[in-house]
Image (tube, rainbow, N blue to C red):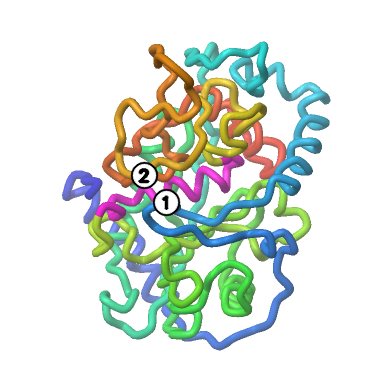
Amino acid sequence: MIMMSFPLKLFLSLTILATELGAFQTNGSHGWAGLNSRANLRPREVQRGRCTEVDPTTIERYERQFSLDRAHGLSSTFPNLQERTPDSPTRRAGLTKRQTLQNPIDVWFHVISADTTPENGNVPLLQVIDQIDALNLGFGPPGLRFALRNVTRTVNADWFNNGGPGTSQQDAMKASLRQGGPAVLNIYSVNFSGTWSSLLGYSTFPQTYASAPTDDGIVIHFASLPGGPLASYNQGKTGVHETGHWVGLYHTFQGSCFDPGDYVADTQPEATPSEGCMEGRATCVVGDVLEGEVDPIHNYMDYSPDACMYEFTPGQADRARMQLMFYRGIAYH
């Protein structure tokens, strides 16, 4: 579990609890038309996947628009942001200019549960705070900060158990609960059952906010929060991974071994998602493996267990900041 000093944690707990007491609510369902591209998502087994995946055609459409946006002068601010091509070898470069947020990203955390017990989703407030700590630890090197602004609690067994991507339950849940504009991160904690029983979480991308603002946010398994009962996946890294998508990052194995991959030059190509924490794995190398050619199993955007994930690359940091600036209106200095 991510730890903070007791006085600070107690102060945060009391401060947030004051707003949380007024936020507890029990909601019914309200219909909402979801994002069309969600029809292209498919579940992955937990041992091979943390979240859903978007089809290559949709990603190509996102990237065509992103290339046009970059052509209008944004790329000069982010020197490490290069797409992977045969002429741009994988590298790990230091940021030439550290850019940080002017203000932290506000987070609304929506706790969905089947009843009022922790084992059925009503996670304790300190566990929510630990999840925000995990976000700040993971995104600290890229210069992103997150601040918990409010916690809502909703008892709705249908949403809790059936809130997978593309379902009417998740549409109703988000339509009822989502707060803020494109710069506000909404996190929903649920249980996944049935078709989605092996799912750890899913997320929207920055480019989709304009066409489907109510859909924006991430949905994670309640047991994946720090200290949760989901063995090997209970350090809050699912939240970090899904937030990685929310800031515009793809999986490290996107496109397998072929360019442009995840559209970031300094993430090593990877043929398939990581299974376990396999040091020295090199799925895109034929013959001898050279230094720097191993799979990025420690990257937050792979599918490794939580204990194995702990880094973003400088190129991913630049891409995230650029996407946040353009698509979410988040300012830097």
Mark 2 and mark 1: span between their CA atoms? 6 Å
**Residue occupying the point 60% across, 33% down:** 262
Please, what is the three-letter code of the amino acid marked with disc 1? Arg
Circle 1 crowding by C-alpha within 10 Å: few under 14, some 14–19, many from 20: some
**Residue occupying the point 54% across, 53% down:** 185
Per the image, is 283 magenta?
Answer: no
Find residue 151 and report its horizontal and vertical position in percent: 42, 66
Residue 296 vertical position relative to residue 207 in the rendered view, above or below: above
Residue 72 vertical position relative to residue 95 in the rendered view, above or below: below
Extreme residue in the front direction? 287
**Residue occupying the point 42% across, 65% down:** 198
Extreme residue in the left direction? 6
Q: Nearer the viewer, residue 23 or 171?
A: 171
Q: Which residues are magenta?
A: 232-250
Q: Nearer the viewer, residue 140 or 39?
A: 39
Q: Disc number at residue 48?
A: 1
As drawn, is 133 to the left or to the right of 200?
Answer: left
As drawn, is 15 to the left or to the right of 212?
Answer: left
* Circle 1 SS class: loop
- Quadrant where the C terminus is found in the figure: top right
Q: Which residue is mark 2?
A: 275
Per the image, is 237 magenta?
Answer: yes
